[in-house]
Image (cartoon, grey):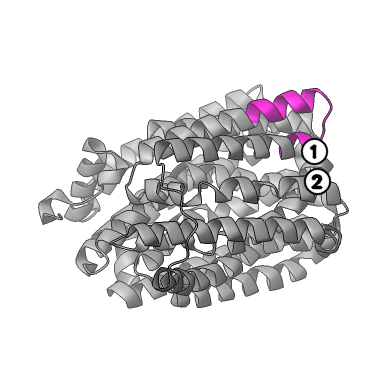
Amino acid sequence: MTIMGLASVVIKLLITMSLSRLLLPQEFGQVATIQIIISFAEIFWMMGVGSAIVQKKQLSDDYIATGNTLNLILGLIIYLTIFIFASAIASLVGSNDITMLRVLSIVFVIHSISGVSEALLQKEMRFKTISIINTVAAIINGAVAIMLALSGFGAWSLVFAQIISVLFQTVMSIIKKPIKFRLIIEKESAKELINFGTGYALSKLFNNIANQGDYFVVSQTLGSAALGFYNRAYQLLLVPTNLIATVMERVLFPLLAMYQDEHEKIRYVVMNLTALIAILAFPITIVSLTLGADLVQVVLGPKWEETILPFKILIVSLFFRMAYKIGDALVRSLGAVYKRLWVQIAYATLVIGGAYIGKEWGIVGVAVTTTIAIIINYFIMTFLIGHLVELKMRELLGYLTPIILVSIVIGGVSYLISTPIATLPYALIRLIVMTFAVGFLYLLAFKFVIIKYMPEDFRGFIEIVKDQTTRKLVPKKKNIK
């Protein structure tokens, strides 16, 4: 995790804390409903062009120009389609905010201008540049949203803030990675892009159905206010996920693409990163389970009590959601987009089917079924990884055993000390004390137990993490070049 990446997540958390006190749950629900449509449309806009560029080893000027042309065409098509059919599309998700949908969809036109530049920055592993752009964009997004919310714009403050931040990202990406502007479609390049992009888009479609399916069911059956509460619970889950897993994925995809034919090196990275994620995810899960009510009160405020139980249920899936990112990046780096597609179909089916069952118990029931779906999805993806790079499930579980056993013990101790900690005044103080207590226990366990009983490869990996940035996560002792 880079300093800029960490700063970006902290800034987003502070923005969430501010906006949750300025806007109503129903207003968050309004925008969350519109975002369901935007997220689906985004899949067909990009059509995997960016990922195809990152994955391809050798790029020609015609290939880049063709990718850029396809991006622009698809961006315009998506925008015009949403603008013309906004009423019918909005009704599919139970929304009547037609004007809001039309206005927000302009992001497709804006973003299509820089899609290829962003992909090239990622391919060149210029992660510092990407992190700076994203961090500043997050600051702009938050500042605009807060100012507009204070001025009484309500849900519109989130819409205008997103448009302005996307505009900034577009301009900066083009400045940092300019490309020669040519509107051409070279036949062979287009064929290759579309072939990879179709598999990627279909896979992304079902992944998005899974990620947005629970939102869709809640919006359709329980209303925008319920979606507002559920959305905030899910966004709290995504804070630690984005803190670690998203940055790892951005680094991993181009890194693994470089070593796509060297399975031993890939297994080394996957197993050790999974172990590292476990060490980072389990303490967060323990604190959230023991003091979830205080966490919600501190981050969101007193009017979000209905978010507490769904959040505590969803946080159980934290490790699985974060570790899944590793497998997803690996499958894409190997170009196995159609195998990934079947995993996403299964995941989407589990989320949608589960949400329709869970809705009978409100957003708590949906949180339970979504958590189960995330966990099952992780194991399905792990089995696929095992097939691709000859990594057995029992080998991975054996690797994680010391961390799992330590976490069970610390979880039990944390539960016992949560009772006296609950007597302390103020939610923030209780949260800080528990966080330091759990952190201290893990530091002791890491130094005297985990490092001692984990395989030698992991100890070497930890040294690499200490000495290098995330972008250089390769094993020195194994002479990876």
Q: Position of residue 107 (x, y in %)?
A: 65, 46
Check whether the beta carbons of the residues at disc 1 and disc 2 lie within 8 A of each other: yes
Q: Is residue 243 left or right of residue 108?
A: left
| Residue 4 shows in this picture | yes
Q: How many numbered tags mark residues here?
A: 2
Position of residue 257 in the picture relative to residue 52 (left or right): left
- Confirm whether residue 422 shows in the render: no
Above or below residue 374? Residue 280 is above
Of residues 368 and 411, the one nearer the viewer is 368
| Circle nearer the N terminus (1, 2) | 2
> Which residue shows up at 63% across the image and 51% down it?
108
Q: In the figure, 297 relative to 347: above or below?
A: above
Image coordinates for residue 461, horizontal then vertical, percent: 22, 48
Q: For the stretch drawn in magenta, what is the main secondary structure?
A: helix
Q: Residue at x 30, y 65 (%)?
A: 398
Q: Amino acid at mark 2?
A: Met
Give SS at disc 2: helix
- Residue furthest toward the right? 96
| SS for dot 1 | loop
**Residue at image location 52% in from the left, 27% down from the top:** 433
Q: CA distance from mark 1 to mark 2?
A: 9 Å
Within-10-Å neighbours for mark 1: few <14, some 14–19, many 20+: many
Dividing the picture into quadrants, the one containing residue 392 is bottom left
Judge whether residue 146 is colored magenta: yes
User: Which residues fall within the magenta stretch?
Assistant: 142-158
Camera-nearest label, 1 or 2? 2
Q: Which mark is residue 155?
A: 1
Image x and y of residue 12, in percent: 58, 34
For label 2, the residue is: 100
